[in-house]
Amino acid sequence: MLLTDELARALGDYSPSAASLLLTLHYQGPMTTTALAAVADISQPTAVRVTDRLVRLGLIQREARAGRTTPLRLTRAGERHATALQRDRLEAMSRVVDVLDGTDRKHFERAMNKILRDAIHSRAFARTTCRLCDHSVCVGKLCPIGSKASALEREMKSDNTRAR
């Protein structure tokens, strides 16, 4: 609960859903409300309400319609808010784990990587799990979640090839 409480305080005035949408757009670029709802693991009506509020606050902007969809993107103010939100979240996590010395931190990181890796059962679940992650830090083999999702996809592809 300590980490959960610290991270909740770091959200400030943002709901977890709003934070998810802001950071997803920040790290992944323009998306539709439907795609954002899937990544944030919230219902479509909730995503619409949250994005409408973020549009009113000037943090998200609707782009030109592309067929039947309207991509959303962060405004400059939205980028600033997302950057500050991520900074506050990282500072909150640091306050909790800074008590660990180097050896303990390595053990903690190894254990967390194992927990995260073992929890992943699909790429969609990985995207939802990583919705608040800084994807410039956690990439490729450094990311236990993405690595597991990629391994699952390779395994499925291999199984499909053998089944033919």
Image (spheres, grey):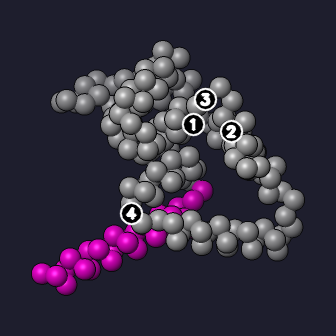
Q: What x and y, as percent, mark residue 147? A: 47, 69
Q: Are marks 3 and 2 in contact (CB under 8 Å)?
A: no
**What residue is rendered at 60% in x and 72% in y?**
114
Give the mark, 2 or 4, whose residue is nearer the N terminus. Answer: 2
Q: What x and y, as percent, mark residue 77? A: 56, 23
Element under disc 1:
helix
Segment colored magenta: 137-164
Label 4 crowd (10 A; few <14 / some 14-19 / many >=20): some
Give the mark, 3 or 4, whose residue is nearer the N terminus. Answer: 3
Label 3 sits on residue: 14
Q: Main secondary structure of the magenta part?
A: helix
Mark 2: amino acid = Ala
Circle count: 4
Asked where in the image residue 99 lies, by quadrant, the reply is: bottom right
Label 2 crowd (10 A; few <14 / some 14-19 / many >=20): some
Label 1 sits on residue: 16
Label 2 sits on residue: 8
Q: Separation of disc 3 and disc 2 at Cα? A: 9 Å
**What residue is rendered at 51% in x and 66% in y?**
119
Near-viewer residue (162 or 135): 162
Q: Seen from this angle, which residue lies furthest front? A: 1
Label 4 sits on residue: 122
Mark 3: amino acid = Tyr
Q: Are marks 2 and 1 in contact (CB under 8 Å)?
A: yes
Give the mark, 2 or 1, whose residue is nearer the N terminus. Answer: 2
Q: Which mark is residue 50?
A: none
Q: Separation of disc 2 and disc 4 at Cα? A: 26 Å
Q: Separation of disc 3 and disc 1 at Cα? A: 6 Å
**What residue is rendered at 40% in x and 74% in y?**
151
Mark 4: amino acid = Ser
Q: Are marks 3 and 1 in contact (CB under 8 Å)?
A: yes
